[in-house]
Image (cartoon, rainbow, N blue to C red):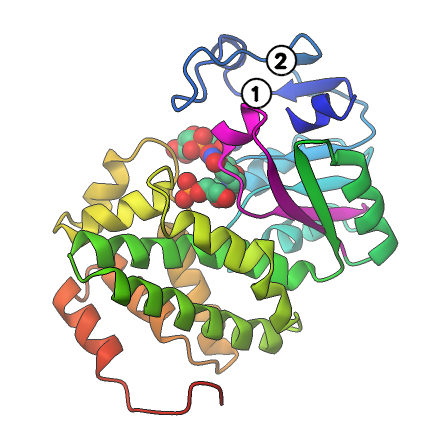
Amino acid sequence: MQAARAGAHVSLWARNPAAMSAGRVLPRLPGFALPDTITVSGDMPRQADLILLACPMQHLRATARHVPPCAPMIACCKGMEQATGLMPLQVLGELFPHSVLGVLSGPNFAHEIAAGLPAAAVLASTERAQARRLADLLTTPSFRLYASDDPTGVQLGGAAKNVIAIAAGATMGARLGENARAALITRSIAELARLSLALGGRPETLSGLAGIGDLLLTCTGLASRNYRLGLAIGQGTPALQAATALEGVAEGMATAPALHELAQRHDVSTPVIATVSSLLAGTIDMAEAGRRLLARPVGHEFT
Ligand SMILES: NC(=O)C1=CN([C@@H]2O[C@H](COP(=O)(O)OP(=O)(O)OC[C@H]3O[C@@H](n4cnc5c(N)ncnc54)[C@H](O)[C@@H]3O)[C@@H](O)[C@H]2O)C=CC1
Ligand SMILES: O=C(CO)COP(=O)(O)O
């Protein structure tokens, strides 16, 4: 929608073109219809000036294999590939080592973007000038893009906010209170800043749209699938059952164990991510999750 609003002719490759054309893809935006400038097809276009990949993370590799590497590619998914522990641009980098790659992330509920409500996001690429060029291409009066040359930090923020949103939802579902949720979100940002540094990203990226921005949205907004999954878990529904009942994908389910493993590999302490990972695996319950986080030794806020 944003590319079309920016003046591009958009070809949308869809698994179910009929449902997409009929607007049956955004239940939160009843009556939504794609504009005429967007062509929907079940056939992959062979030429493009820019390619946006907007599928769930666990399907990115299989989806990208169909894409001709004829233009810069932007990953719009937020998560980690569970089988490999890779982030979106690492997956695309394996498949398309010679392509210009970027990632788009930030506080962006799809139904609000489709409705043309104002929003901002960050577009990251390893090359500063490239990030700026891609951000310029997609910016519209209602969608403001900021460029970043820290794709590691941006991807980490996008992946991790799904995990933290589950924790925030579980906190509210278990009626642990808004103080607990605020503390959890804030301490999560400290975890992510540490992890970003260890991965070669910049801690300050986590203070931006792809970090705090998306956490603010998805740790408080009932439209977040990850938050709703957490709410159900906090109310006592087993994680797998809650995920199956959810409409759409909750990326945090697959990303939590992958992120926890990544943090362990880099010897970074991430208690919130570790606790969510155990909660989702069913090896601890909510009571134990709360105990684990509160029983940690007292320390300095910033070490
Ligand atoms: N929906 C939103 O508001 C936003 C979503 N994102 C990100 O975009 C990515 C896609 O999310 P959504 O479009 O909301 O997904 P979705 O929730 O619409 O996906 C729905 C279902 O379709 C299946 N599916 C989708 N693509 C598939 C494929 N290529 N092959 C096989 N099965 C497939 C999935 O298994 C899933 O159960 C995610 O990484 C998400 O974090 C980012 C910003 C906003
Ligand atoms: O990433 C999103 C908004 O920025 C969508 O959040 P959920 O995937 O939790 O619904």
**Three-letter amino acid code at the position of disc 2:** Val
* Ligand 2 sits in quadrant: top left
Label count reads: 2
Query: Which numbered marker is on residue 40?
Result: 2
- Magenta-drawn segment: 98-125
Amino acid of disc 1: Ala
Residue nearer the viewer, 85 or 75: 75
Q: Characterize the local packing of mark 2: few (<14), some (14-19) or many (20 or more) Cα atoms within 10 angstroms.
A: many
Rendering coords of residue 212 (x, y %):
51, 59
Marking on residue 14: 1
Q: Is residue 289 left or right of residue 166?
A: left
Mark 1 Cα within 10 Å, few/some/many (few <14, many 20+)?
A: some
Q: CA distance from mark 2 to mark 1?
A: 7 Å
Residue, far right: 129
Image spot of residue 256 (x, y percent): 39, 59
For this rendering, which residue is in front, 46 or 215? 215
Q: Is residue 215 left or right of residue 233?
A: right
Towards the viewer: 28 or 196: 28
